[in-house]
Image: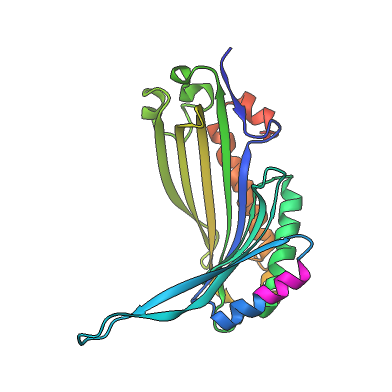
Amino acid sequence: MSCYLPYASTHSIQEAVVGIHFQGEVSSETVRQALDRARSELRNVFPHSNETRKQGIKIDQGNLPPQFVPSRLVGFELSRVKANARPACVLRLSEDALTVNFLEYKNWRATLEDSQKYINTVLPCLKLATTPVMAFSLRYIDRYTFDGPHDEARAELLLQGTSAYMTSNCFRVGPLWHCHSGWLEILDPENHILNQLNIGSAHVDRVSTVTIDHNAICQLGLPRQTAESIFRPPSGEKAGFEKILNLLHDRNGEVLRDMLLPEMAKQIGLQA
């Protein structure tokens, strides 16, 4: 009988992304310091590295031709790869965010611990007093492939028609559809979570595939200007990194349980 199969057999997670987001842009000097430290302390974890540079153009108001401005360092990527040469994990610093992409997912506890370790290696080099952290984020990309003929793939073989996150049209149009939505969750007067949920069914590598992309961003009411305020907040603090990331992880589980058929939720370890 045709059915959907989770991406990794025991779970459906293709990628998990943990991030912190800055108010303002990180300077080139700061990026260089962070890259040198990360290369030194994490070389056994991330053997590969690349710099990200931005090229500018200066346009004169007269008749002079445009001039290229020397490129500047705006970010970097450190990575390790799988046996097939595809990325397994990527630590990325851009002008306004620091993220860890896990493309070889183990479990949530390992993901949380590793992301804290990698982020905390880079943070001491960042001038958080001038570019404070204003948000934490957790993104999950789950995939389910259809084991059967493409034209037999239907949403109801994987998803519940009663889900609050699905439109009924997706259950009437066959194997190709998408459903994108978003909502805001108020944690308290200062902190709230922006949820972006993109669900779609497409033909990927000749196989009908449903992708559930849930990005949850906790926007902080108060800027975090030190690493200590991020990872070791005062007792009772509701918006510390670990507390918020655990909350975003739990929310993702709730969304999936609402959408998936009970047998699939059980198969990937999401018990009600």
Give whichever of 252, 72 is nearer the camera: 72
> Is 133 situated above or below 59?
above
Residue plotted at (76% across, 72% down): 40
Q: Residue at x 60, y 54 (%)?
A: 17
Residue range highlighted in magenta:
35-42
Q: Residue at x 68, y 59 (%)?
A: 243
Between 26 and 234, which is closer to the camera in this rendering?
26
The kind of secondary structure the magenta stretch mainly shows is helix
Residue found at the very far top of the displayed protein: 1
Q: Can residue 163 be seen in this snapshot?
A: yes
| Quadrant in the picture for the C terminus | top right
x, y percentage for residue 49? Answer: 65, 64
- Would residue 26 be found to the left or right of residue 114 on screen? left
Residue in front for this viewpoint, 106 or 45: 45
Residue 191 lies in quadrant: bottom right
> Where does the image place residue 100, in percent across and percent down from the top left?
64, 59
- Residue 232 visible in the snapshot: no
Report the residue that reaches farthest toward the front: 65
Q: How many marks?
A: 0
The picture quadrant where one finds residue 218 is bottom right
Quadrant where the N terminus sits is: top right
- Name which residue lies at 52% across and 44% down: 213
Q: Is residue 268 above or below residue 223?
A: above
Residue at the extreme bottom: 62
* Image coords of residue 173 (percent x, y): 36, 24
- Above or below residue 215? Residue 99 is below
Q: Position of residue 183 (x, y in %)?
A: 44, 50
In the figure, is residue 154 to the left or right of 62? right
Colour treatment of the image? rainbow
Image quadrant of residue 177? Answer: top left
Residue 54 inside the magenta-drawn segment: no
